[in-house]
Image (cartoon, helix red, strand yellow):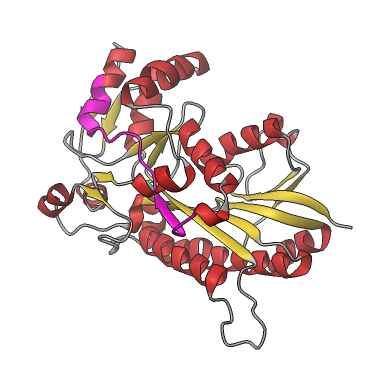
C-alpha cells in the first residue's frame, strides 16, 4: 500500500517555509516535498521525504506516484514577476508547464486512489492588469472577475493556470464516455504581496516592502524602487499560511468559486517606510523609482474585495497593518538579526 501524504512543491520558498512548520505541527499527514533547493536542516527533519529536483522532471512525479498516495498538493513552485520578465520562456515553463504537469499528476493520483486530490494553487494580484493610475484609483477594490488583463508573463501564467485548474476540476476530458472530472479538487487564492519576518523574497515586484524592513533591521540603507504613493495590498506571512490551510480544510460544498481574493491591509510605500522608521529609528530609506518595475506595480490593484473568501471559508486575517508591524514584523525581525 502507498502511504497517504501531503505534497508541497517549491517547499524551500517563502510560503513553503511557514507552511511546513504549520503542517508538521498539526501532524495530520506526513509531508513530502519537491524543490530545486534543499530545505533548511530543521525543516528537513519535519518532512517524510525530500525530493531535490524540478517539477518539470516527469520521472520525479512518476516516482512519487508509484510510492505515495498524495491526498493534498500545495503547488507553490513558481518564478515570480520580476524574474519571469527577464526570462519569459523559463517563466512559462515553470509557471504553466510545471502547473500543468502537477494538475495531470493530481488527476492520475485521484484516478488511482479514487478520492479527489485537493490542489491548492497560489495565484496572485498579478493576475490583474489596470491600464493606468487613474483607472487604478477609480477602480478601488477589485472583485475576482474584474480587470483580468495582466501585463506580466507571471500574471498571464497565473491567470491561465487558474483556468487550467478549473478545467481539470470540472471539465477534464468532457467528451470521454465515462466522467473523469472531479478527481482534482482545485482551490486557488490570489495572494497580495507577502511580508515575512523569517525570509526575504527573490524575483518579485512587491519585494520593496519586505526588502525595506529587512534592510532596516540589518542597518543597511535601502533605496525603494517605487514611488512613495504606490499602493497595493499586502499581508503578513502567518495570515497567508492560515489562509492556505483554511481554504484546504474548507468543506467543498461551501466553496462557490475556484479562485478567491484575500486581503489584509494596503499601505502606500511611503506609509510602509514610516512604519519601518518607527520600528527602526536609524533606518535609511530613500526612494529611487525604477520606472519599469513601477509600471508593473501600478498595473496591480490598490485593493481587492475578499468578501467571498470571508463568507465561503471564513477568511479572517489576524494582522492589520499596525499589528503586523508591532506584533509580528518588528519584534521578530529584530530578534533574527
Ligand atoms: N509577490 C509577487 C511578485 O511580486 C506577486 O505575486 O511577483
Q: Residue furthest right?
A: 1
Q: Is residue 107 left or right of residue 247?
A: right
Reply above or below: 103 against 234: below
Give how far across and how far down residue 304 sits, in percent. 29, 46
**Which residue is nearer to you in this view: 28 or 77?**
28
| Frontmost residue, 239 versus 54 | 239
Judged from this view, the residue extending furthest toward the left is: 134
Residue lying farthest to the front in this orientation: 253
Picture coordinates of residue 302, whole percent (x, y):
23, 44
Look at the image and say whether residue 278 sits in the magenta stretch. no
Residue 78 is at least partly visible in this image: no
Q: Is residue 225 left or right of residue 44?
A: left
Residue at screen point 77% across, 63% down: 65
Residue 91 on image: x %, y %: 46, 61
Magenta part of the chain: 255-274
Residue 75 in view of the camera: yes
Residue at image location 53% in from the left, 40% down from the top: 15
Task: Decide which of 74, 60 is in the foreground and name it.
Answer: 74
For the point 43% across and 57% down, which residue is it? 259
Foreground residue among 138 and 193: 138
On-image quarter of the N terminus: bottom right
For the image, the number of numbered tags is 0
Amino acid at each position: 500500500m502507498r502511504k497517504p501524504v501531503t505534497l508541497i512543491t517549491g517547499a524551500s520558498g517563502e510560503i513553503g517555509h511557514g507552511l511546513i512548520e504549520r503542517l508538521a505541527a498539526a501532524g495530520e499527514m506526513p509531508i513530502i516535498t519537491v524543490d530545486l533547493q534543499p530545505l533548511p536542516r530543521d525543516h528537513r527533519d519535519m518532512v517524510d521525504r525530500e525530493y531535490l529536483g524540478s517539477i518539470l522532471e516527469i520521472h520525479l512525479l512518476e516516482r512519487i506516484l508509484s510510492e505515495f498516495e498524495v491526498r493534498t498538493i500545495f503547488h507553490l513552485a513558481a518564478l515570480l514577476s520580476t524574474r519571469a520578465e527577464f526570462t519569459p520562456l523559463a517563466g512559462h515553463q515553470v509557471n504553466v508547464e510545471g502547473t500543468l504537469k502537477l494538475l495531470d499528476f493530481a488527476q492520475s493520483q485521484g484516478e488511482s486512489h479514487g478520492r479527489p486530490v485537493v490542489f491548492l494553487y497560489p495565484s496572485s494580484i498579478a493576475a490583474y492588469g489596470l491600464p493606468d493610475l487613474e483607472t487604478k484609483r477609480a477602480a478601488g477594490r477589485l472583485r475576482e472577475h474584474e480587470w483580468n488583463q495582466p501585463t506580466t508573463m507571471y500574471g498571464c501564467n497565473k491567470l491561465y493556470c487558474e483556468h487550467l485548474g478549473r478545467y481539470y476540476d470540472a471539465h477534464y476530458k468532457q467528451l470521454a464516455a465515462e466522467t473523469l472530472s472531479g478527481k482534482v479538487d482545485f482551490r486557488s487564492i490570489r495572494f497580495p504581496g507577502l511580508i515575512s519576518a523569517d525570509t526575504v523574497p527573490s524575483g518579485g515586484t512587491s519585494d520593496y516592502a519586505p526588502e525595506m524592513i529587512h534592510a532596516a533591521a540589518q542597518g543597511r540603507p535601502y533605496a525603494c524602487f517605487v514611488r512613495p504613493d504606490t499602493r497595493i495590498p499586502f499581508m503578513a506571512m502567518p495570515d497567508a499560511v492560515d489562509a492556505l490551510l483554511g481554504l484546504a480544510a474548507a468543506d467543498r460544498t461551501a466553496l462557490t468559486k475556484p479562485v478567491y481574493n484575500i486581503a489584509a491591509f494596503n499601505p502606500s510605500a511611503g506609509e510602509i517606510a514610516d512604519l519601518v522608521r518607527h520600528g527602526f529609528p536609524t533606518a535609511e530609506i530613500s526612494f529611487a523609482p525604477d520606472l519599469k518595475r513601477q509600471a508593473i506595480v501600478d498595473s496591480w490593484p490598490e485593493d481587492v474585495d475578499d468578501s467571498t473568501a470571508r463568507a465561503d471559508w471564513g477568511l479572517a486575517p489576524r494582522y492589520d497593518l499596525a499589528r503586523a508591524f508591532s506584533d509580528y514584523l518588528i519584534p521578530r525581525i529584530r530578534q533574527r538579526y
